[in-house]
């Protein structure tokens, strides 16, 4: 490996280490606990090193973590759908989506609630956002303008937030998902 290749690898590893620490701190203590001082202490670098990798500071770190989260969510929903179609695919994807949101609350918050300057619902949206949207659209067989996928996504998002807040009966999740499958599962 060349010297420049080795340096690029070290920079990429350090950058990933910063992201991993930020995500771990956020999952443990919330995004308010993700400070440059705490992260620098956790990884053994100075604060200027953090800013060298993320000049936009915490906002850039949250955005990068959130975009990676969209990739993870797309992977999880695609895997859940597998070869299923129709209502069974909707049930599988809804379960994977809701489980993802519950398992990664701080990541989900960064993805959907924090200001990350992402271009949702735009033609020039980041590839990670398009990938997540397309994973849902594929399950639905969406061939239109994306409205059906937006409605499905918003239903999943609302369910995830209400579940997390304890405002939905946990024992009724399967019934709620079945209702989604009845409405979205066998579209013409």
Image (tube, rainbow, N blue to C red):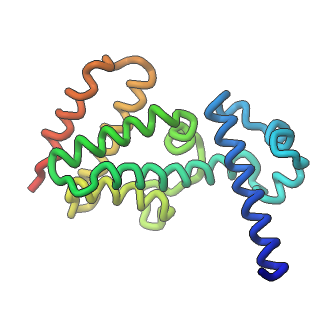
* Quadrant of the image occupied by residue 130: bottom left
Closer to us: 156 or 90: 90
Up/down of 79 relative to 167, above or below: below
Q: Residue furthest front?
A: 1
Up/down of 90 relative to 145, above or below: above
Up/down of 3 relative to 44, above or below: below
Up/down of 61 relative to 110, above or below: below
Q: Residue 164, how many percent across, how many down?
A: 44, 25
- Quadrant location, the C terminus: bottom left
Q: Is residue 34 left or right of residue 168?
A: right
Q: Residue 123, how many percent across, how many down?
A: 42, 66
Q: Is residue 63 left or right of residue 183?
A: right
Q: Residue at x 46, y 54 (%)?
A: 120
Q: Residue at x 34, y 55 (%)?
A: 78
- Quadrant location, the N terminus: bottom right
Q: Residue furthest left?
A: 188
Q: Is residue 27 left or right of residue 96?
A: right
Q: Residue at x 28, y 26 (%)?
A: 173
Q: Residue 25, how many percent across, how many down?
A: 69, 35
* Quadrant of the image occupied by residue 40: top right
Q: Is residue 29 left or right of residue 111?
A: right
Closer to us: 152 or 38: 38
Q: Residue at x 65, y 35 (%)?
A: 26
Closer to us: 134 or 92: 92
């Amino acid at each position: 490996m060349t010297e420049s290749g080795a340096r690029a690898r070290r920079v990429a590893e350090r950058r990933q280490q910063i992201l991993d620490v930020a995500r771990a701190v956020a999952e443990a203590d919330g995004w308010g606990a993700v400070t440059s001082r705490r992260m620098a202490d956790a990884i053994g670098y100075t604060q200027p090193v953090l800013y060298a990798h993320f000049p936009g500071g915490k906002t850039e770190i949250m955005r990068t973590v959130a975009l990676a989260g969209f990739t993870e969510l797309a992977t999880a929903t695609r895997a859940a759908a597998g070869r299923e179609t129709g209502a069974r695919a909707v049930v599988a994807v809804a379960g994977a989506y809701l489980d993802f949101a519950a398992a990664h609350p701080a990541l989900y918050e960064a993805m959907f609630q924090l200001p990350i300057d992402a271009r949702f619902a735009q033609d020039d949206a980041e590839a990670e956002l398009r990938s997540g949207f397309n994973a849902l659209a594929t399950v639905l067989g969406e061939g239109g303008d994306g409205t059906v996928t937006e409605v499905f996504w918003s239903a999943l998002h609302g369910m995830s937030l209400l579940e997390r807040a304890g405002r939905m009966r946990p024992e009724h999740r399967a019934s709620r998902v079945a209702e989604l499958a009845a409405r979205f599962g066998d579209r013409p």
